[in-house]
Amino acid sequence: MPKWIFVTGGVLSGLGKGLVSASVSKLLQLRGQEITPVKCDGYLNVDPGTMNPHEHGEVFVLEDGTEVDMDFGHYERFLGIEASGDWNLTSGKIFQEVIEKERRGEYLGKTVQMVPHVTDNIKKHFRESAEESDADVVIVEVGGTVGDMENQFYLEAVRQMRNDLPDSETFLIHTTLVPYLETVGEQKTKPTQHSVKELRELGLAPDMVVGRSEDELVETSREKISLFCDVPEEAVISDPNLETVYQLPLVFDEQNVDSFIADRLDLPERSRGLQEWNEKVKNLEKDTVARIALCGKYTEMDDSYASIEEALKHSAVELGGSVEIEQIDTEEFSPELLEGFDGVIIPGGFGARGVEGKIDAINYCRTNNVPILGICYGLQLMTVEYARNVLGLDAASEEFDEDAEDLVVKEMTDQKHIEKKGGTMRLGAYSAEVEGLVKEIYGEEKISERHRHRFEVNPEYEEQLEQEGLKISGRNPKLGLAEFIELPDHRFFVGTQAHPEFTSSFENPNPLYLEFLRSCA
């Protein structure tokens, strides 16, 4: 039977429960444990795929094609694992399953209720995730904060699990805010005390309290939290603001977080340490290897392009330094904004807003020999720019101008008659047979990356584009779909229909991002 760690949050959302979960998981992984991370979200969307990045941050795509919460990006980047879509629970998914069971008559004669039917379904998902992954430790992050109406049934399911299992098989970490009040010049623990009080009213008592704060928790704060929240002082953990998220496992290691958990759950000793991880973190404190412009339209929220920024950091660490990244809003774009940057990334996106600014950025990079990497929509707009300015066509994509004379990018045939938007794009891992620079970068003739799109380069224009120098250097072997494009005589002009940032991790950077950054350095 696996051991269970539950991570809850209090006071307010956005404290970094996902990073706490990922960091604890990393430390336990060093003890030879197979970790399965599970995330519970309270929203009624079946998955986050239809949400605007301004509202919820980036949508992360798994190998199996499931669109999931961005916390799964932290899990995969820290642990170097491939997560499963079954590990992401939402209220929408849980309710949908319960209602479908009721309609099939599986609850015949019963009054279907939150308890036990909804909570039983949640516990079933927990157990199935553990069984299918053969996990040693399952770490369940409950999204939102204690007191939220939408996550009450998750917390009730956790309470029932804790009651059903021996004390030596479950552990509860509560992450809360410890603010610093400037008017009195001290950290305040009262919000944490009230949050734990509210958690106790739901029948849950924390085994460890993680205090998020601007600076390290002072000794008096630790003592108060220990006293009033009824946890040992060594189980009051400081989680201060850090320069990089990859420092957090080191910060937890210094406070013996995994040792305290391992004693409680009877886990084995560590089989290896964090020396290599620490060396990589030190690289992020060194000089900048390149300054990169990220030209997109979802610039109002920092997390909109989280995976791209992290993939660049992974590559910078591999090159022995850090990377400076600046987001540029393509709705208000002029080429002068790119002066002083060593390279440009055109990220994925949807719709017409900001498109012309992205095309102008591509033109600037192509004509000034500035390294550029196009991701998904970025590849499509690189094709549009080349068709307009080199071939002289009235070129556009069907996505933003369906009346254009030359639709060099069109909706995929199997997408045209799809009416439902959720979970219906070309999602997940697809292979490509590659050549040219892309083959050199990956070191293989056949590669696989994750996708999230509805449109493709129009095959009717491919011969014309290639005759004028734009090389299609990767194709899907089954559909013949253009997966990579490049300009052979350019310093670095590569577009991919995929999202290679989703397969990059701190200890194993994605090769395409690595070579892009190397060309910029």
Image (cartoon, rainbow, N blue to C red):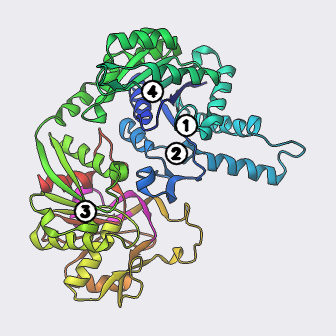
- In the image, what residue occupies the spot 37% across and 15% down? 256
Residue assigned mark 4: 176
Instruction: Of the two numbered discs 1 and 3 on the same chain, state the one appearing first in sequence.
Output: 1
Measure how far apart labels 1 and 2 are at the Cα level: 9 Å
Mark in front: 4 vs 2? 4
Q: Residues within 10 Å of mark 4 (few under 14, many from 20)?
A: many
Q: Is residue 65 visible?
A: no
Q: Is residue 443 magenta?
A: yes
Badge 1 vs badge 4, beta-carbon distance below 8 Å: no
Where is residue 27, by image quadrant?
top left
Q: Is residue 170 left or right of residue 317?
A: right
Residue assigned mark 1: 133
Mark in front: 3 vs 2? 2
> What residue span does the magenta drawing correspond to?
432-454
Instruction: Of the two numbered discs 1 and 4 on the same chain, state the one appearing first in sequence.
Output: 1
In the rendered image, the quadrant that contains the N terminus is: top right
Residue assigned mark 2: 84
Badge 4 vs badge 2, beta-carbon distance below 8 Å: no
Measure how far apart labels 4 and 3 are at the Cα level: 46 Å
Element class at badge 2: loop
- In the image, what residue occupies the spot 31% across and 72% down? 355
Residue 438 numbered mark, or none? 3
